[in-house]
Amino acid sequence: MSKFWSKVWAITEKDILMYYSKGPVVIFGVLFPVFLFLAFYVGRELPASFLIPGLLSMTLFFTATSVPPVIAPWEGQTKTLERLLSCPISVEMMILGDVLASFIFCVCLSAVPVVVGVFAGVGVKKPVILTVATLLGALCFSCFGLLFSAYPTNLPSNVMMLSTLVKFPIVFISGIFIPVENLPHWGVVVASLSPLTYFTDLARLSIQGYAFYPVYLDFLVLFACTALFLLIATKLHKRALPKRL
C-alpha cells in the first residue's frame, strides 16, 4: 500500500510542477471567478455575507476544474504519456495523482475568498462545516474535471471548449447569483441536479447561518457525486487511453 501511494504522490508532484503554473490555471481558476464576481457585484448593494459564499463556490469550482481536463491531452500531445505508461503504474494511480494535485491546489486557493471575507467583516459562523465542505467539494469537483479529459483527443483546446460549455451553465444554476429559495419551482429542480448547488448551500450555512437543504443531504450528495465521478472517470480513461497513443 505504501508503494501504491508513493507512486500516486509522484504523479501528484509531476502535475503540480508541470501544469499548475500554466495559463489555464491562472485564467480559468483564479482571474475568471474574480472578474465574474466583480461583474455581479459592481453597481449592486449586496451584503458581503451574501457575496463571499458565492465567490468561494466559484473559486473552488473553477480552480478544481481548470487543469484536470487538460492533463491527459497535454501529455498525449507532447508524447509524455507513452513514457508515463512505460513506468510500473496503473490508470487508477494516474487518476488519483491528478485528483490529488488538483485537490491540493484547490484547497490552498479556496482560503483566499475566506480571508477576503474576514477583512470585509464577514465572520464564519460554522468553521467546521465550512472546512469539511471545502475539502469534500474540492475532491468532488476535481473528479468532475477529470470527466472532460476522458474525451479521446490530444488537443487541449477541444477539451477546454467542451468543459467551458458545461461549466458555465452549472455556475448559473447553482444558487451562486440567485439563492435557491428565490428560484421558481422548476429552477429549484434544475439547481438540485448540480453538485455545486450543495456546496454553495453549505457555504451559505457556514457564513450566513442558513441553508436551503438539510446539512446531511448536502454532504451526502457531494460524497455520492465524488464516488460516481471518480468511478466514471476511471472507466472512461481506460477506454480513451489507447486512442491517445
Image (spheres, rainbow, N blue to C red):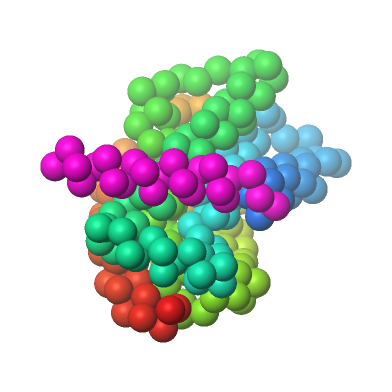
The magenta span reads 1-23
The residue depicted at 50 percent of the width and 20 percent of the height is 124
| Magenta stretch: includes residue 184 | no
Q: Is residue 191 visible?
A: no
Give the position of the C terminus as an image quadrant.
bottom left
Find residue 237 and report its horizontal and vertical position in percent. Answer: 35, 71
On the image, which quarter does residue 59 sit in? top right
- Report the side of 111 relative to 26 (left or right): left
On the image, which quarter does residue 243 sit in? bottom left
Find residue 35 and report its horizontal and vertical position in percent. Answer: 77, 46
The residue depicted at 61 percent of the width and 22 percent of the height is 115
Total of numbered circles in the picture? 0
- Report the side of 42 relative to 220 (left or right): right
Find residue 236 and report its horizontal and vertical position in percent. Answer: 33, 74
Q: Is residue 203 above or below residue 83?
A: above
Q: Is residue 113 above or below residue 225?
A: above
Instruction: Determine the main secondary structure of the stretch shown in magenta.
Output: helix
Find residue 182 and report its horizontal and vertical position in percent. Answer: 56, 51
- Along the line of sight, the residue nearer the viewer: 187 or 56: 56
- Report the side of 228 relative to 129 (left or right): left
Q: Is residue 155 visible?
A: yes
The residue depicted at 78 percent of the width and 42 percent of the height is 38
- Along the line of sight, the residue nearer the viewer: 77 or 64: 77
| Magenta stretch: includes residue 10 | yes
